Amino acid sequence: MPVMSALFVSFFLCSGSVFSSEIAESPDVRLLDVGHSFQGRHRVLVAASPGVNPVATLHWERALEDAGFDAWRMFFGASVDTPERLHRAILSMDEAWKNKTYSIVAHGYIGRFLVEANPSAQRMVLVGVPLGPQVTETRIELPADAAVVLDGLPWPKTLLGPLPHAELSRAIGEQYVYFASSSVAPDPNADVLLMSSGMDVVAPPECMRLPSVDWTDRTFFRVDSAGIRSSTHGDLLRHPVVERRMIRFLRTQ
Amino acid sequence: MFWFSFFLGFASEPTGEVHFLRTQDGAQIALHHRPAAGPPVILVHGISSNHRSWDLEEGRSLASTLQEAGRDVWLLDLRGHGVSRPPKSTLWGRRKWSVDDYGRYDLPVAIDFILEKTQADALDYVGHSMGGMVVTVALAENPELPLERMVILATPMDFSDPDVVSTWGLALGRSFGFFWSVLPSPLAARIHGRFRLPLPVDEMLFTDLSSPAREHMYDEIVSPLFFGELRQLWATSQHASFMDVDHQQHYIETLSSVQIPTRVIAGRGDRIAPVDRVYGFYDALSSAPKDFIVAGKATGFSADYGHLDLPLGDHAEAEIYPLILEWLTMDVEELE
């Protein structure tokens, strides 16, 4: 965590930027214009899941800014502690940006909430997003005690790779567990790029590719098809191939 | 070129009881026997492999585990693999044999021989990777194939969303194969096994196979890749479906009428046959009961199993062999 925080601060100091925030109508969701404030460039909203520190997407934001996009970060207030409030927060974000052309890049569970909210984004890049259930029983589980706040995602930490954890409400954690056992996400209106790695326990290809086979305007990319690196859920946030594919897709007219 | 490649690969001489059988189209296949009093089971290897993938060394031998459990074990070398031989024909003719031929000729003659020798009515089947495709072809030819139970390891059957790298790899292999009819993979494997070439071969094949078993594996189980196999698999990726060489039949449709109790096991770290592609085999089966297992840390295993780890990995004897034995020893009526 200290390392990630230092990276976060140094990025903004070195880039000479200042925080330029724009708060949407809802206090539950915050939209932060990261890096330089580019006027007129295509906006890309970058989202990390509740339970993951928002600085996790720093490398993506930097890559997007370097590629000429205007990167924004979406994160949620402490009041967003149930799946219903999270859903409403996403809808309020979309309401605030409904007159703007924008795309979304999402990592992990937040992508599932975004798909279900079906925002007006032009394109969506979903990386490690569980869209359907696991095909066998897995080690995802909530702590047995009655804690209201969990320490990160409800998986053994060793299986997630380098992922900066954050507090997670139990109610949202329960929804994550539910995603692993049942239901399939609907086909969103946006053009979608799906990226998945076999070593990502949260959203391996059977939980991303198979549930989306019938989607329209959908491209699937297997991150580790012949790669040397094994890409865990956390590794995907810093995988150079993921960044390249993401930018290529977002540039597509 | 075939013999040249074999020579370079130093194919091991068979040990123990081996039967050489002549197929309908003139190939000579080898059936290695590990006798026991119990019911028979046949083990069929994958592509560019041979029967040693079931019997590499002590602690990495499904054949020994099954035999010690009282099963009468038969290990098949498909034509051109191990000590089997292709049909006597022209060089051009040799290029043409494919997975279809393994399922249409090699497996049926092996099954007939085993049933005749053991006087059993049926036998169990264990296939690794292409070994699962071989039995699919055989079932398409003969839906009444006398199999009691099946365990399928790492056999892909869902080829939608083809991977760019795999498709290019198959296209490249097919192009080389066209000129040479076989690819001298045994020699390449021996060199890589000794000198660890800077290629991601190990990462593609296994995650849990430590030395010296790694080197032993490269020395003993790698057989040539044949043009016909590569051509059929390349077409499979192009059509996003496992089809016969004439592109007339989608073999996945065969599985929808199979009633053989089947356990399918996939490796979480498998990059040759990823879990979602192997799930296609399980999903297509109509047989009840059926069972799907993902061998990975997230499902309680001690490793994320790669393609060769399922039969040969460091933890296979402790974690995978018992799953195979369990399925093969369950009462069929109880399974149903």
Image: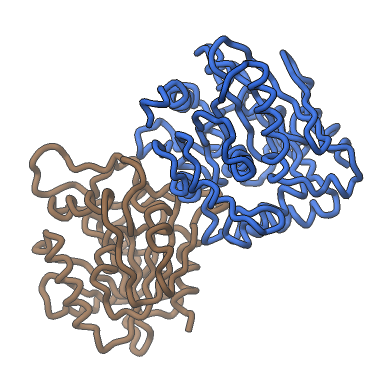
Looking at the image, is A41 positioned above or below residue B252? below
B32 left or right, relative to A28: right
**Colour scheme employed for the rendering of this structure:** by chain
Q: Which residue is pictured at 89% across the width and 37% down the height?
A: B88
Is residue A93 shown above or below B135?
below
Quadrant housing residue B63? top right
Residue A84 percent across, percent down from the top left: 13, 64
Residue ranking furthest to the right: B90
Q: In this view of the protein, which residue sits in the foreground, A246 or B107?
A: B107
Q: Residue at x 67, y 20 (%)?
A: B116
Q: Residue at x 73, y 57 (%)?
A: B172
Above or below: residue A44 compared with residue B95:
below
The x and y percentages for residue A122 are: 36, 80
Q: Can residue A35 be seen from the camera position used here? A: no
> B80 or B223, which lies in front?
B80
Q: Residue furthest top?
A: B37
Locate residue B41 relative to residue B24 in the image: left or right. Answer: left
Residue B279 percent coordinates (x, y): 45, 47
One can see residue A213 in this view = yes
Residue B99: x percent and y percent?
69, 44
Q: Provide the letter of the chain coloured blue.
A: B
Color used for chain A? brown
